[in-house]
Each structure stands twice: as structure tokens, then as C-alpha cells.
Amino acid sequence: MIDLIDVGRLALGLAFGVAVFQLSAAALAVARRAPELALSARNAATVQAAVLTAAVASLSAGFLSRDFSIAFVADHSSRDMPVGLTLAALWGGQEGSLLYWTWVLSVFAAVATRRMLARDAELGPWGLLVLAAIQPFFVAVMAFATPPFKRLAVAPLDGRGLNPLLWDSGMQVHPPMLLMGYVSFTIPFAFAAAMLIRGRLSQAWLRELRQWMVLAWAIQSLGLLLGAWWAYRVLGWGGYWGWDPVENVALLPWLVATAYLHSALAQERRGVLRAWTVALVLLAFCLAVFGTFVVRSGILTSVHSFALSSVGPLFLGFVGLVLILSAVAFLYRLPMLRSPTRIASLASKEAGFLLNNLLLLSIAIATFWGTIYPMLSEILQGARIAVGPSFYTQVNLPLLLALLGLLGVWPLLAWRRTSRRAIWHAIRWPLLSAVAVSALLVGLGLRDGLPVLGFALCALIGAGITLEVGRGLRAGLCLPSAQRRLAVLGIFAGSRRRLGSHVVHLGIALLALGIIGSSAFKAESAVTLARGESARLGAYTLTYLGLESESSVGLETVRASVGVARDGAFVGPLQPTRRIHAGWESQPTADVAIRTDLPRFDDLYVLLSGWEDQGARASLRILINPMVAFLWIGGTVYFVGVLILAWPARAPVRGAVRLGPVAETSAAT
């Protein structure tokens, strides 16, 4: 019989040995300018991916076979867990999630190293060297500091199982996607760092870097959306974003990556913001590693982070070293990164891109400061001072509103310079649409200025997108009938980036509608009802009908039956539930009952808080979350746009626009 622990340990030992060989080969390839050594380093990256795949397969096999002699398996699974959740337990703890992190990095690196050498034979070895210098750290931390293949002297008959909060389908998709998002920022960092070290900007590498950055941004976007969906359904507090430290650090690289994508477009089209594009790539990776440090160290209180761990100082030292080296390389090569052209006018797309970056970075800085402040206050003052959601709302809300306003106007401006007359001609209809929406809301009795402003800005964005699409369609329809169909279909087919941008911006406007509506008009009540009693909240009347319980192996489920009527008409039952897992009796978990009324776009959200006298009375927490449906609709639209942007482009054709006015930029090395 195969001993999975021995196989896993052997695979990790081989992975570390291969990582050291890869680093040595890459360093010698650069020092001796030896292409054959660069090929050896590239092949070593593939071998490392293969042996780490064997390690992941061994741990997964341990979960599936219920091999509780493996300490990690015993701590994070049990016999009564379903297969899907058992496999997801791989990333349910420190050791397994680091193994997954390192494995995904090895797979990405195996693909990226081949593309590096294929795109630029001179820069390729430098990119290999950067990746080869990063990978041994993660392999060493995972293999030696938090090994996932510890053997128990006596294997228990059953494991403890996952934390009850993780018993959800979201566990199977959100953590691996978010971890993959963190990992994926490594590859564009390697491209950017290699160009800085070598002192040459390659247009082929800039294109490749952008593709990897779009991929990282897409994965991180999906991870954040899935996290909001999971939190709303599982955590039981009625929200989808709580400005939790782990949520914040996942948002930070996404904000920076979003700024990068806009900078990259400005650089490609007009040759401006070149230094921004490189700096944002470096910063995104540093923030991704910082996020990993926060989750792994446990130094900040969060429902998502692991317990206090010895790997925290290792990650802190690593991110500090990367940040210092990146800053030194960036400042040293800053003359090379100066843009060949300047922003000619504030009334231009280029200026809009710059302002967009400043707003996104301002949000990132405020969020970063609020996240680390409790830790700094404890170090400097000896007392941990918590930073609540009100801080982020007060600081970030004006910035977010400004960003929405910019999003509604700046895409309508021209490159280089827009005259006053052209500005008015471009924005008059979107602006009038926003004013009309504001007047309508005020006429309907809405007096709160912030929601009115937010809805008006969303209307501004939607009207601007409609105007842009309408202009393209109108131009196509003016052509002769024989050319009309091809022209209309080709309006966006020839500019997939424009189509993707429009869809993403529309998704953001819909997301903003959901966030504004659910935050401004939320209603909540906590009631205790006897069987047959009713409570009213808004248009809903809820009647408590009774309680039932059932038991299975390792699990007790208590379910309340609640009848729901809206405006006096019965619309159906809801069954909020509490689960009590064996070994986790002190941590009962809620299954929230949610009813979505799509015609009205609101959610009725009911949580079973407790019960008395064997179910004769039940305590319920009832929330009405208006317009939350727009959040999920907008998230879907947004991700469709992300997929359009991230879909691999065809090879450049003759006549295509170059990425910038300067094909190559070199500096003395």
C-alpha cells in the first residue's frame, strides 16, 4: 500500500531541490549568457510543477481515503463530510492553502517561463531568474515551516472536520479563486522586474505583461465577487462587505491592477503614464504578498484569517525585501521610464486616466491605512484601536462617488485635447439624463442627497455607454445595405477592448446601484415570536409556524418554518436553519433564508437567532435589503466584460496600432 505521507514528503523535498537548481541555472544563464542553461531553468520550472502536482494529489488522496494518520487531514475533515467539501478542505487550513498557493505558482511559472523565452531571448533569462528567486521562498516555507504531511503517532477513528462556517458550496470556489488571484500577480511582476533589471523595455514583453495582468485582475475580480456572495449567504449579518482586514487586503491588489489597466491603455495609445504602468505592476505584487502575510500571520483579527502563526515574520520579511528591491530598481531606472510625450490638456482622455489612477490609489491608501492601524496602534501605544466600517465609509465614499462621476464623463472625451464645445456636445445627454433621474427621485419623495447623487451618477454612466454604442450603430446603419450588417457586427469585433470596457463599466454602474440601494434603504428588526404570532417589517408580514429538528451523524439541524406575506398576500414559506456540528457545539452555524423579489429587486433576509421551550418561541432577525439583486446582476455583467477583456487576443496583424510611440527603450546596464 502506498504511504501518502512518504510520497508527499518526497515530492516536497524534490520540489525544493528543483527550485534550488532552477535558481542556480537561471543565475548562471544570465551571468554566462548561456541559452542552454536558460532552457534548463525553464525545464526545471516544468518539473517543479509536476512534483508539486504529485504533492497536491497525495494530500487530496489522503482526504478522499480518510487517512487520519495525516495530521492536516485529521484536523480539517471528518467521515461525515461530503466529497466536494472534503476536497475543498485542502485549502481549509494553513498548511494546505500554502501547498495550493505554491502549486498554482509553479503551474503559472511553468507556462510563463516558456512564453518569456519565446517572446524575447535576451530578456527571457532575466524573467526566469526573477521567478526562480521567488519560488524557493514559498516552497521552503510550505515544506519546512508549515509541512502539510505531518504524521500522527496514533491515527484517530474520525477527524475533527472543517469549521462549520466553511460547510458551504462557497468554500469550493471562493478561497481557491482568491488564492489563485494573489498568486497570479507574480507573473507580471517577473516581467516588469526583469525589464527594470536589464534596463530595456520590450514592446513584446509589455504586451505579454498586460495579458498576464488582465488575467490576474480577472481572477481576483471573480474571487472578490464570490467572496461577497458567500459572506451574504453564510455569515448571517445581512451584508456582503464588512471592511474586514482580510477583505481589505484582497481588495488592495485589485484596485492597483485596475489602475494599471487604465495606465497601460494610455501608454499604448499616447505614450503617457509609462512609469505608472511599471510601478503599479510592482505594487500589485507587493500588496498580494502582503495580503498573504495578513491571512497567514493572524496578527489582525478577522473571521477569514488563520490562527497566530510563525510564518508571519517570514512573509513580512519577504514582502519588505521585495518592496525595497522593487523601489530601488524603479528609482534607478526612472529616467528610462519617463514618458516620451506629456499630457497636453486636462480635458483629455489621458488626464482622465491619470485622475482615475489617483482616485483608485487614494482608496487603496485609505484602505491600507485603516487595515494596519490597529496593529500600529498596539505597537506604538500598547493598545489595539479598532477601525470600523464607519471610517472606510467616511473616507472612501466621496472618492467612490468621484470615481463614478469620472467614469461617466472621461470615456466620452477625446485623446490629447477636447474643446469646450466638444465636451458639452459629448456629455450633454448623459448629464441631462443624470439631472432627470435626480429630479424624478426627488419628486418621488427621496430627500437623502447621497442616494440621489449616487443614482444620478449611475444614470450618467449608463447614458454615456448608450451614447457611445448608439453612435457606432448609427454610423454602421448609414452605410449601404450590402455593407451594413458587417459594419454593425464589426463595430466592437474590431475593438474587443472597447466592448469589454463598456460592459465592465455598465457592470460597475449596476453594482453601484445595488450597493447604494441596499445601504441607504435597508430595514431591520429583531423579534421573538410565539407559535402563530406575526411580525411586520415594511411590506412583509412574517408568521412563526413552528420548529423542527433532525439529527444525523455528527450533525443536528434545527429549522424554523416562517410564513411570509407581502402587502397582505401570501408569497410562500421560509425556513431559516441552525446547524450544530459534533465537536463544534459552541459554534452553531446559521443557514440564512433569503427570498428575492425580482420585480421589486429586494431581498427578505431571515435568520434564526435562537429558540425557547422546545420551539414554542423563536427569535428571528429580519432584514429587508433593497436592490441587492442589482449587486449580483451587476457582478455577472461585470465579469462578462472581464472575460471579454481577458480573452486571448489574436496575433497582431499588419497595420495594427503599435503599443506606444517608442518601440524599444534601453538604458545602460
Image (cartoon, rainbow, N blue to C red):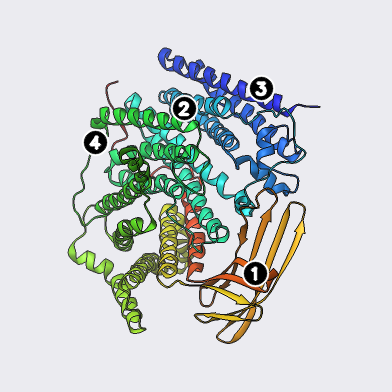
Question: Among all residues in the image, which is located at the extreme top?
Answer: 32
Q: Is residue 552 visible?
A: yes
- The amino acid type found where label 4 is placed reads Arg
First in residue order: circle 4 vs circle 1: 4
Q: Label 4 vs label 3: CA separation?
A: 49 Å
What label does residue 404 carry, if any? Answer: none
4 or 1: mark nearer the eye: 1
Number of residues whose C-alpha sits closer than 10 Å to that of mark 2, classed few (under 14), some (14–19) or many (20 or more): some
Residue underneath mark 4: 338
Along the line of sight, the residue nearer the viewer: 605 or 341: 605
Query: Looking at the image, do the residues carrying marks 2 and 1 touch, with CB atoms under 8 Å apart?
Result: no
Query: Looking at the image, do the residues carrying marks 3 and 2 touch, with CB atoms under 8 Å apart?
Result: no
- The amino acid type found where label 1 is placed reads Glu
What label does residue 10 carry, if any? Answer: 3
- The amino acid type found where label 3 is placed reads Leu
4 or 3: mark nearer the eye: 3
Residue 224 image offset from top left, x and y in percent = 49, 52
Residue underneath mark 2: 134
- The quadrant of the image that shows the N terminus is top right
Residue 518 image offset from top left, x and y in percent = 45, 68
